Amino acid sequence: MPGKTAKKSNPTPPDVTVHGASTLAAVTVDGFNAQLRDGDGFVGDRARRAAFFEIFERWRQLAERKLPLLDEVSPDDMSKSRIDEALAEGRPQEQALVHSAIEDYARELLVVIRRLLRSESWRDTQRIVIGGGLKTGRFAEIAIARTELLARADKIDIELRPIHNDPDEAGLIGGAHLAPSWMFASYDNILAIDIGGTNIRCGIVRLNLDKADDLSKARVRDLELWQHAEEKLGRDAAVARLAGMLEGLIRKADKEGLRLAPFIGVGCPGSIAADGSIETGAQNLPGNWESAGFNLPTRLWEAIPSIGGHETTVTMHNDAVVQGLSEIPFMQDVARWGVLTIGTGLGNARFTNRARPNEEQKAARKRDDSRDAGGGTRKG
């Protein structure tokens, strides 16, 4: 009818990238969020953060001597820094206790790694990066080194390394590798989110492309931390709180004159579908994030439809994948590598490096030059 306004459809975010994509600019994601089981449940549970502290407590209960650095702390209050202090400065009995826990935990971690390496997506892995909250303890770094030695004694040719960046920042820095590369031509900073079973972190990641074009110098400029596990918020309230954190960072960026890209990179637990829904693995988040009617990237886009006058793009992937992406610049000497994130659970992802566009062009020119040197192309 003349004069009748057409009904607008529900707004949808721009489809610039695919959530949970298997092919990214620098790597192919061969697999992530592997849920390996044995007769006792998930194999990965044997190497999660709580598993180390359970092992440590068993050894502490066996000690009959007074342990000044370790006796006065309850199991719930035992910190990584206290364990590191006992390892470095404690009595011989305290140091022996920590070393015993390290040894037992390393053997459990090796069980998990051995199972992963048997799976098709992890076959021929050359290096595994260990991230997650446990990594920040010196005792954990020793456990990683001990696990590598045990693997080699078991004829498993694998290299284990602690993640380069602080795990609290690696999950944000990795978000830069989800952004379209053309976006870097105009902006110096992006917004990133790292969602965990205990904490949610939001930050501004400074790309520092003037220092290194491979993002190896990317750093977290500003970080907001919310320990959501300590509050009993529902899902919608949690998303609103998350959006508020982002809005605060946007205001700060505007006040400081930062060139903030209209992009938000998100790392979230679970199996992430191409449309941004969470299929499985979000059970530790507040409320039901696996509902068919819930889509986090869309919710964030609705809350923040534009940044700096340009329409916002939100891209989400598994949190272990995103933390692993922060290691891309440091993994160029191997072809196939993986990441384990040790926290509330045990996240995992496996990658195969892809040639950078300029490298592909150089290889093509080299092939052409080789053909020309052999007599050129045939005519007629």
Image (cartoon, rainbow, N blue to C red):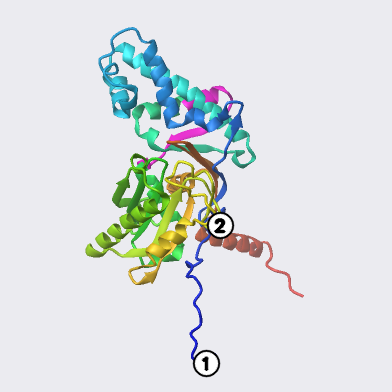
Indicate the secondary structure of the residue bearing disc 2: loop
**Residue 165 seen:** no
Q: Is residue 158 magenta?
A: yes
Q: Marks 1/2: CA distance?
A: 40 Å
In the image, 344: left or right of 307? right
**Residue 187 seen:** yes
Q: What percent of the width, then of the height, locates residue 163?
A: 41, 39
The residue indicated by pointer 1 is: 2
Picture residue at 41% right of the left edge, 47% below the top: 195
Q: Quadrant of the C terminus?
A: bottom right
Picture residue at 32% right of the left edge, 21% below the top: 87
Up the image or down, 178 lies above or below 115; here it is below
Q: What percent of the width, then of the height, locates residue 147?
A: 48, 26
In the image, 336: left or right of 11? right
Residue nearest the viewer, comparing 245 with 117: 245
The residue indicated by pointer 2 is: 274
Picture residue at 43% right of the left edge, 53% below the top: 266
Residue range of the region highlighted in magenta in the rendering: 147-167
Identify the amino acid type marked 1: Pro
Q: Residue furthest top?
A: 64
Identify the amino acid type marked 2: Ala
Q: Residue furthest bottom?
A: 2
How many marks the image carries: the answer is 2
Q: What percent of the width, then of the height, locates residue 375?
A: 69, 65
In the image, 328: left or right of 242? right
Q: Nearer the viewer, mark 1 or mark 2?
A: 1
Q: Quadrant of the N terminus?
A: bottom right
Q: Is residue 160 magenta?
A: yes
Up the image or down, 179 lies above or below 352; here it is below
Q: Quick one: label 1 or label 2, which is nearer the N terminus?
A: 1
Determine crowd level at label 2: few under 14, some 14-19, many 20+ residues with C-alpha closer than 10 A.
some
Picture residue at 29% right of the left edge, 20% below the top: 86
